[in-house]
Amino acid sequence: MAVDIKNLNHNQLNDLISKAQMRQNELRKEKVVKLREKVHAMIKAEGYSFDDIFGGARGKTKRTGAPVAPKYRNPANPAQTWSGRGKRPHWFNDALKAGKKEKDLAI
């Protein structure tokens, strides 16, 4: 199927590009499915399971750490605290600019 793109207007070209990209994605997905089936068949033929080869945990595991206790408190609003990790809050920077020191804001 040869398409003469010189005779297409802007909208027709965009439509053609969109359809071509969708078809390209479909073909890629089909290849992935076929490859996955081949890999599973090879693993099964050797007498192993997928988990034997690639491990039981799939994907990233979430951290289950406890929240960090706050180290600093805003003297103007005691409800505002900061653990000392991540980006400094505005109130912390403002207090430093006003002449306070980190140890003055420590809990």
Image: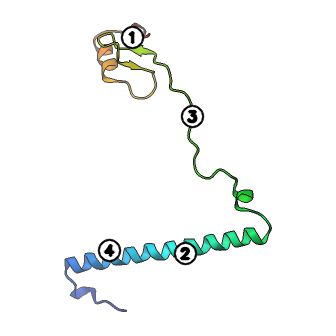
Q: Outermost residue toward the top?
A: 104
Q: How far from the left and from the top, in percent, is residue 45?
A: 77, 72
3 vs 4, front mark: 3
Q: How far from the left and from the top, in percent, is residue 46?
A: 79, 69
Q: Earlier in the sequence, mark 3 or mark 1?
A: 3
Q: Local crowd at mark 2 within 10 Å, few (<14), some, or many (≥20)?
A: few
Q: How far from the left and from the top, in percent, is residue 91?
A: 31, 19
Q: Secondary structure at mark 1?
A: helix
CA gap between label 3 and label 1 equals: 29 Å
| Pointer 4 residue | 18
Residue type for callout 4: Ser
CA gap between label 2 and label 1 equals: 59 Å
Q: Secondary structure at mark 2?
A: helix
Assess whether mark 4 and mark 1 are in contact (beta carbons under 8 angstroms): no
Q: Earlier in the sequence, mark 1 or mark 4?
A: 4
Question: Is 57 displayed left or right of 46 in the figure?
Answer: left
CA gap between label 2 and label 4 equals: 20 Å
| Pointer 3 residue | 64
2 vs 3, front mark: 3
